[in-house]
Amino acid sequence: MKKLKIALLSYRSKPFSGGQGIYVKYLSKALQNLGHEIDVFSGPPYPDLDPDVNLIKIPSLGLYEKKSKFYDVKFLQLLDPINLFEWLSVNSGGFPEPYTFGKRIKKVLKKKYKKYDVIHDNQSLAYELLFLQKKKPLVTTIHHPISMDLAYQLESTNDFFLKLLMRRWHSFLVMQKFVARRLNKIIVPSNSSITDINNEFDVSKSKMERVMNGIDLKIFFPDLNIEKIPYRLVTVASADVPLKGLDYLLQALFDLAKVYPDISLSIIGERKKGGHTERLIKKLNLSNRVNFYSNLTQEDVRKTYCESVLAIIPSLYEGFGFAAVEAMACGVPLISTSGGALPEVIKDAGVIIPPKNSKEIYNSIDFLLSSPDHASHLSQKAYERVKSKFSWEVIAKKLEKVYLKQIETHKHANN
């Protein structure tokens, strides 16, 4: 098998949360283990990579990680037109990172693209990919169409001005749709996402290929040294993100607390102070039962799963569902909605319920808490499914075949 030199592009790669940072970390490591040479090009926040994988930083203003998006920037930085555009866009409610990453990565790769056998973009979908695609074999991963996120956010409010702000923030979708339709090869983690990308972005299904995501079974596993906390539930959902369906879980928790006095919920995700979710928690008098955990190491994430008796994924939609696979790998009985790709990922290794239904969440939690034998059966079934289907080594080998085929296609197209 030919050993490849691969450029893996990611406009932001939050290390321990969010699918993109996890995808970059483990895919790059798995490809490196197959003998390929990987350079990861990433904007901030930067990924936590294996020491053998080379990280090439593509600096931006990083305004989303700063206290003040307006003031925490130096005047000299704004003399750069790309920086100025980023600063103006962020401070007018936009999300320019995919666009500005494209501008910056073209400057870098224009000088060195010849050294790579293939370029793999992780959902930046920047205009510059069309330039790079002419020069080198290019593969792009689209986890799911972000237009789905926007649709759910618009449904969550009747505030006209808030809807305008949501549309402004998602203005990068114009670029993503334009670019996606013109790409030669797209990797998608689920059949559900293939259908959604076809519908939302008008991308031909013939250009897309399903290669599901993986998980590191050395990090996520049933840790018998961690003691279970009775009636502890766990979910992964950043506050005030309607797509994650946290409201419905909180409503169910309110009712469950009347039957199970010791019930509690760990939320792996960020709390937004003073936001909608915090207000709802106070309104339902759940402050002493709900805890948010963010900026965790992966060992901490495993501990949070393993000390819980049930995991719940109340999402309205997921293009894949990393959290579901993490919970399954830790042997935690899983309750999940049928939103997006989740049934495809979980199959019969968990309880599948309709989204947007707090009563179904209540009933499923109540059933598993009162049926420990069935919960234990689901735990074992989930772990076995993850071991057989979601190894990163298996995923990397599938992608290796995609790369080699795309290299041949590009070679013939340019002869």
Image (cartoon, helix red, strand yellow):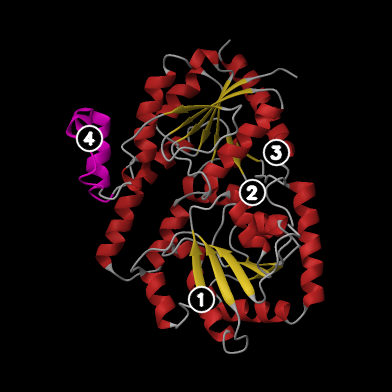
Residue found 51% across the figure and 44% down from its top: 15
Report the magenta residues as a range: 69-93
Q: Where is residue 134? Give x, y as percent.
A: 48, 20
State if disc 1 and disc 4 touch (CB < 8 Å).
Answer: no
State if disc 3 and disc 4 touch (CB < 8 Å).
Answer: no
Q: Determine if the magenta segment contains residue 391.
A: no
Q: Where is residue 79? Give x, y as percent.
A: 19, 28
State if disc 4 and disc 2 touch (CB < 8 Å).
Answer: no
Q: Mark 2 — residue? A: 190
Which amino acid type is marked by label 3?
Answer: Ile
Give me the C-alpha separation between circle 3 and circle 1. 35 Å
Extreme-bottom residue of the structure: 258
Crowding near pointer 1: few (<14 within 10 Å), some, many (20+)? many
Give me the C-alpha separation between circle 3 and circle 2. 13 Å
Mark before the other along the chain sequence, 4 or 3: 4
Crowding near pointer 2: few (<14 within 10 Å), some, many (20+)? many
Q: Mark 1 — residue? A: 250
Q: Where is residue 286? Give x, y as percent.
A: 48, 79
Relative to residue 359, is residue 219 drawn left or right? Answer: right
Give me the C-alpha separation between circle 2 and circle 1. 28 Å
Q: Mark 4 — residue? A: 84
Q: Determine if the magenta segment contains residue 80.
A: yes
Q: Mark 3 — residue? A: 395
**Quarter the C terminus occupies:** top right
